Image (tube, rainbow, N blue to C red):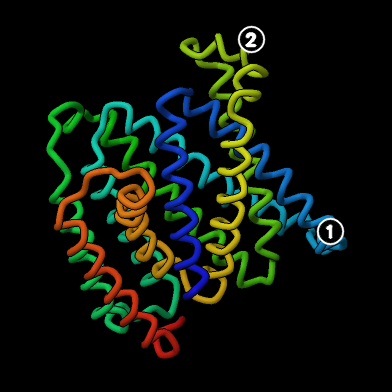
Amino acid sequence: MIYLIISIFFYSLNNLLWKKMLQKFNPWFLMSVRALITSMIGLIIIIIFYPNLFNQIDLQSFLLVTSASVSGALGLICMISALRYGTLRQLGIFNLITILFTIAYLLLFENFILLDYLSGTFLILIGFIIYILQIKKQSKGEYDLKVLLNYTLMSFFFASSGIIHWNNLKKSIPPIFSVVNQELIVFVICSLVLLSSTSTKYVNFNIIKMVSKTYKQLICMALLIVVAVWTSFLGLKVTNPFLASLLSLITPIQTILLGVFFNNEKYNHRIILAIFFMIIGAYVLHLNLDNILI
């Protein structure tokens, strides 16, 4: 489970950079360029450390990994589309729904006993609910059907992606291949959205200028994502998608705390209480991990 914890830390660091970059640039531009750089870094790692990797991947494995990557990329698109008019409170609630989708699959198709995870899960959920409740209410888009549909699709696609990746990793498909495949898919899909969007056509003429201004931050984001995604897949390989999605609830709260330390952002005491419950819950799950793995 240590890999999942490391992954959460690097995702949180990436979120800090992401927040800063979003203030200046279009999200589709950021994701497409970042994903391209991430893919290149992953390919370099494969060439240096896994020179025979592509010879080990057959067509069926490639299609399975690609299907998981497409599902994850679609979930990302739905999330960004929903956040245009939705709220962070809604995002938190639908993150819980992602876990419910995952649990439903595991209960129906795997030898999964939810009661084995109950104590640690309960503590983590208490912490996450405290986090959700401290978010200021926003009426804008709160009950918009399009927003709710995008969030629902996000939950479904993210759950599907995690489940398919997990099954692929159980078949000994190397995690680094899944990393590169996923980032290439994100690059292709986000680039298509960027180029087809009437509101971002100006990017087509200024992309070189934009990259030249932000290349240091983009490379830093790419490095963080490589480590975050790679360690998340390593963690997923030795645990299961329920634990991976459950522990990912810590990410937004840790991002807030890192923002306090690095950017002097404001916080309230409920955030400290939330992270306390979640850390204790994660520790309880860690102690019982040998007994609850599927």
Q: Is residue 281 visible?
A: yes
The dot on residue 140 is none
Looking at the rendered structure, the secondary structure element under dot 1 is helix
- Name, please, the residue furthest toward the bottom: 291
Foreground: 269 or 164?
269
Foreground: 106 or 174?
174
Task: Write down the residue under mark 1.
Answer: 48
Q: Residue at x 25, y 32 (%)?
A: 86
186 relative to 131, above or below: above
Is residue 135 rendered to the left or right of residue 21?
left
179 relative to 197, above or below: below
Q: Few, some or many C-alpha atoms within 10 Å of disc 1 (few <14, some 14-19, many ≥20)?
A: few
Task: Write down the residue under mark 2.
Answer: 205
Q: Quadrant of residue 219?
A: top right
Q: Residue at x 58, y 48 (%)?
A: 69
Q: Is residue 95 visible?
A: no
Q: Amino acid at mark 2?
A: Phe
151 relative to 59, above or below: above
156 relative to 120, above or below: above
Measured from the top left, where is residue 92 in percent x and y?
26, 49
Q: Residue at x 35, y 43 (%)?
A: 263
Q: Amino acid at mark 1?
A: Ile
Measured from the top left, where is residue 251 in percent x and y?
37, 56
Tally of numbered tags: 2
Measured from the top left, where is residue 123 in percent x and y?
22, 72
CA–CA distance in space, label 2 to label 1: 35 Å
